[in-house]
Image (cartoon, rainbow, N blue to C red):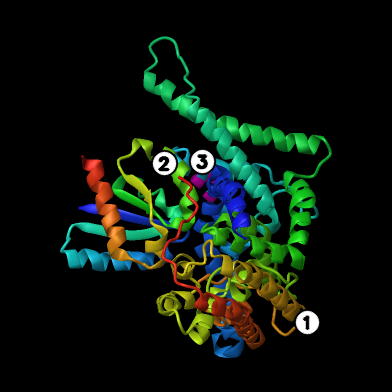
Amino acid sequence: MKRIMLVCSSGSSTSLLVKRMQEAARKKGLADVEIFSTSQADAKNHYDSMDVLLLGPQVRYLYNELKKTLASKKLVLDIINSRDYGMMNGEAVLEQALKLMQQENK
Amino acid sequence: MEAFIGWMEKHFVPVAAKIGSQRHLVAIRDGFAAIMPLIIAGSLAVLINNTVCVWIPALKFLTPVNGAIWWGTFAVMTLLIVFSIGYNLAKSYDEDGLAAGLVAVASFIITLPQAPEGVGWGFIKINYLDATALFTGLVVALVATEIFVKLIKARLVINIPGDVPPAVGRAFAALIPGIITVFVFGILTALITAMGGTSLYDIILKTIQTPLQNMGQGVWSAMLATFLITLFWFFGLHGANLLDPVMNAIYLPALQANTAAVQSGAVPPNLITRVFFDTYSHLGGSGATLGLIIAILLVARRRQDLRNIARLALPAGIFQINEPVIFGLPIVLNPILFIPFVIVEPILTLISYVATAVGLASTTYVAIPWTSPVGIGAFLATGGSIGAAIVALINLAIATIIYIPFVILLDRQKSKNDLDTPDLK
């Protein structure tokens, strides 16, 4: 099972994108991917069970500090592309997440 | 305009990033986020008491239930936030959040007077736990947790000679950070009393919290706050999230004072509260972007891409979520939309302030979820004021009118597909 977590201020706007990503995953026939969104405050409770953490571009200022915090953990961190975020492009963001996991596994 | 945006990207955006990731501000922000459900529960209880229970006398038996709920939630919000901040700050250092939260609560109670004026020994006044103690709570929670975590990180070791099992020494060492932390606050409290002061609560309330709150009640401060929030958003940064620690610290006590007043049958004292902004200014999200969406649907004719985004963003916009327009349109770094986007909220704030001051709309006193739609939010936040709902809807119309000329300009422009959000990596 691959777990992807999307994080923004309260997990609301990312939840919109999560829905799109789940649809994209279903279309691709990916059954073993779990995608969910949460608030910045809650994110820290899930670091150990996640494979990918994607930040909404509006909270990208969390990136540098998070990178330090997550240095010792296995999950990969990245920021969602602004344009894809605005267009709620689930396919592109899913692709971004899958690529990150592949890179990590190499 | 280009030069200005370039300058801001270079100087303003990095500062914003620093603020946004500053550990203690993040702990305060996350601390508030964690107690928000309880604050809304307490608010809901007071709301029911003052609406449904008044309208339907048969439901009067619910009044004591709601009163009790309010007492244990919103009325003691500082007690809740002290634990929550201790927990979150310790977690950010990857240390034991539960232990830190408990030490923070203990340290906070240590600083409170044991014999409040007029009642003798053995009482904790409700004010010591409610929002008037908020700044004391913030300071104590942050300092106590810092001391506690630093001492844990120092890995104090106690060498007990002889055949004492090592585990005994370790257990003892684990106690030391907590013991030292509470002693620090014990000593501080005794010092304040010995020097003739009343309590840390009194000192912080008089010198810091009250002046800041009075400033916050000025309409210019409120307008400035909304301006800053939208300015951050223009650069693609979550302005509301960045300013959350400040907005909550200043305007949540104002809201709590109003709720307490209503609960005890008095007139709510504060015109501007935490929910004032969600109900009257952030219409459809920061920058009153629901007005922008409506403006596009009304006047954009040539550019289908604008209309597509507006349609995509409308359902979320109704519930105050506007990332699709912010990043999809985009508003971010869009020179044409800069002016309406940053002036619309201060204008709406001024209008709503005046409308509340002259009594067109009732004062807000209920904490509502920020996702409440325009009008409904105002109706709920004011405990059922139709006038407030109308003011919110008029605000939406004004926001739409402000955006219309700029949308016409945008409609004449060629569509542009590239968006370079200032990078912070």
Image quarter in which the C terminus of chain B is found: top left
Q: Nearer the observer, disc 3 or disc 2?
A: 2
Q: Is residue B211 magenta?
A: no
Mark positioned earlier in the residue sequence (3 or 1): 3
Q: Check residue A67 in the rendering and tell me which mark sits there, or answer none.
A: 2
Q: Residue at x 46, y 61 (%)?
A: A10
A40, above or below B266, in the image: above
Q: Which residues are magenta?
A: B84-88
* x and y, in percent, of residue B237 in the image: 52, 57
Q: Chain of mark 2?
A: A
**Looking at the image, which residue is at 32% across and 60% down?**
A36
Q: Above or below — where is B358 with respect to B325?
A: below
The residue where tag 3 is placed is B100
Residue type at numbered disc 2: Lys
> Distance of mark 3 from mark 2, alpha carbons?
24 Å
Amino acid type at image mark 3: Ala
Badge 1 density bin: few <14, some 14–19, many ≥20, Cα 10 Å: few
The quarter of the rendered structure image containing the N terminus of chain B is: bottom right
